[in-house]
Image (cartoon, rainbow, N blue to C red):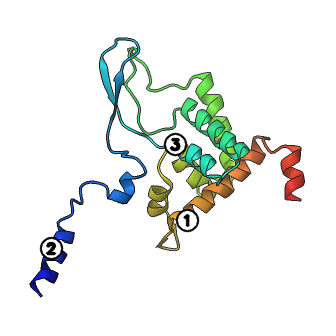
């Protein structure tokens, strides 16, 4: 009887601050990547970041056209300066009336607005998913936990399904679905 208690205690003492053995067999993503800075030669540390679109493309969850549509949206989103993290301008104009948009930012915002309109608006499931997962680069799981419909949280699988369908709509909006894709779907 004492040996059974001892085994239970050893299981409970597993270090929960570290990833499990199963997770580590897929790569230790918590460790920083160390390399030399190409300009100065000094050592720098980078954290590993996961590109959701690239992972989904490699897994076969989305097509190349869907990936390219998501990459186009992300590029427009960044050019429009819609992300929440902003740096202070290096040169501040005295007497300025605040932030002004450049022509490039204005055009990028029009493109983002058009893409969101094609998805049913920013408040639609597809629009909200693309805004947060592709634009703000949240994980699908994080977005699914934060958003929900009818007071219920949606799961990762449902969130990934929303993203896949939204990327399909974006591929059509950007004109990336070729004749071959149309005949295969018919």
Give the class, few, some or many, for how many residues have Cα within 10 Å of label 1's Cα (few <14, many ≥20).
few
Residue drawn at x 33%, y 57% is 21
Question: Residues under labels 2 and 1: Cα distance?
Answer: 35 Å
Q: Which residue is mark 3?
A: 51
Q: CA distance from mark 2 to mark 3?
A: 39 Å
Asked whether 162 or 4 is in front, the reply is: 4
Q: Position of residue 163 (x, y in %)?
A: 61, 55
Q: Is residue 184 left or right of residue 122?
A: right
Q: Secondary structure at mark 2?
A: helix
Residue 157 image label: 1
Q: Which mark is residue 9?
A: 2
Residue at image location 13% in from the left, 81% down from the top? 3
Residue 143: % across, % down:
48, 56
Q: Residue at x 64, y 55 (%)?
A: 61
Residue closer to the observer: 130 or 43: 43
Give the vertical position of 93 relative to 131 (above or below).
above
Assess disc 3: are there few (<14), some (14-19) or many (≥20) residues with their C-alpha within 10 Å of its C-alpha: few
Q: Is residue 119 visible?
A: yes
Marks 3 and 1 sit apart, C-alpha to C-alpha, by 17 Å
Looking at the image, the residue that sits furthest to the left is 2
Quadrant assignment for the N terminus: bottom left
């Amino acid at each position: 009887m004492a040996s059974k208690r001892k085994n239970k205690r050893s299981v409970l003492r597993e270090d929960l601050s570290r990833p499990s053995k199963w997770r580590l067999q897929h790569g230790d993503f918590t460790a920083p990547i160390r390399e030399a800075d190409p300009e100065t030669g000094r050592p720098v540390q980078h954290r590993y970041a996961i590109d959701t679109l690239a992972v989904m493309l490699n897994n076969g969850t989305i097509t190349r056209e869907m990936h390219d549509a998501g990459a186009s949206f992300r590029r427009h989103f960044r050019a429009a300066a819609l992300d929440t993290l902003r740096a202070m301008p290096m040169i501040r104009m005295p007497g300025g009336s605040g932030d002004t948009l450049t022509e490039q930012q204005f055009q990028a915002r029009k493109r983002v607005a058009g893409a969101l309109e094609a998805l049913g608006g920013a408040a639609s499931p597809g629009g909200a998913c693309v805004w947060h997962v592709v634009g703000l680069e949240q994980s699908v799981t994080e977005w699914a936990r934060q958003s929900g419909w009818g007071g219920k949280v949606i799961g990762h699988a449902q969130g990934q399904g929303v993203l896949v369908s939204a990327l399909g709509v974006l591929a059509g909006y950007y004109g990336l679905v070729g004749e071959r894709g149309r005949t295969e779907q018919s």
